[in-house]
Image (cartoon, grey):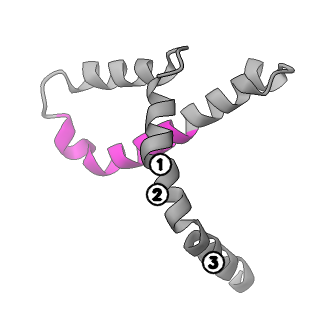
Amino acid sequence: SIKAIESSSKEDDTMWLTYWVVYGVFCIAESFSDLFLYWFPFYYAGKCLFLVWCMAPVPWNGSQVLYHNVIRPCFLKHHEAVDNVISDISTKA
């Protein structure tokens, strides 16, 4: 990620920022479901394969697929409500 930030190309920055957004959403979802998921056989192997797929240096990697098909539509649908809540919290603080 540091090499992407320090490079002159914007393309690699977008790739790694997309990965970190997907990884963050995955970590939040996993924190709620980890209690049940660790009972499944090969959960940790599947998790590792999933994260490798998200980092793969190909155009169809997991980060791009999940971001454009799941996270971005959800964000665009709810971003105004989130902005309003954050604005209300900041004014109260």
For the residues marked 2 and 1, what is the alpha-carbon distance in whole angstroms? 5 Å
Question: Mark 2: which amino acid?
Answer: Cys
Image side of residue 7 versus residue 18, left or right: right
Judge by depth and name the residue closer to the eye, 11 or 33. 11
85 up-or-down from 8: above or below: below
Mark number, residue 71: 1
Q: Nearer the viewer, mark 1 or mark 3?
A: 1
For mark 3, give the secondary structure: helix
Residue drawn at x 27%, y 22% is 46
Label tally? 3
- Amino acid carrying label 3: it is Asn
Q: Can see residue 1?
A: no
Query: What type of secondary structure mainly makes up the magenta span?
Result: helix
Q: Position of residue 89 (x, y in %)?
A: 65, 79
Q: x, y percentage for residue 49?
A: 34, 18
Residue 47 quadrant? top left
Q: Which quarter shows the N terminus? A: top right
Residue located 36% across and 24% down the image: 50
Q: Is residue 29 magenta?
A: yes
Q: Decide: marks 2, 1 in contact (CB < 8 A)?
A: yes
Q: Earlier in the sequence, mark 2 or mark 3?
A: 2
Magenta-highlighted residues:
21-38
Instruction: List the residue tagged with mark 3.
Output: 84
Label 2 sits on a secondary structure element that is helix
Kind of residue sitting beneath label 1: Ile
Cα separation between marks 1 and 3: 19 Å
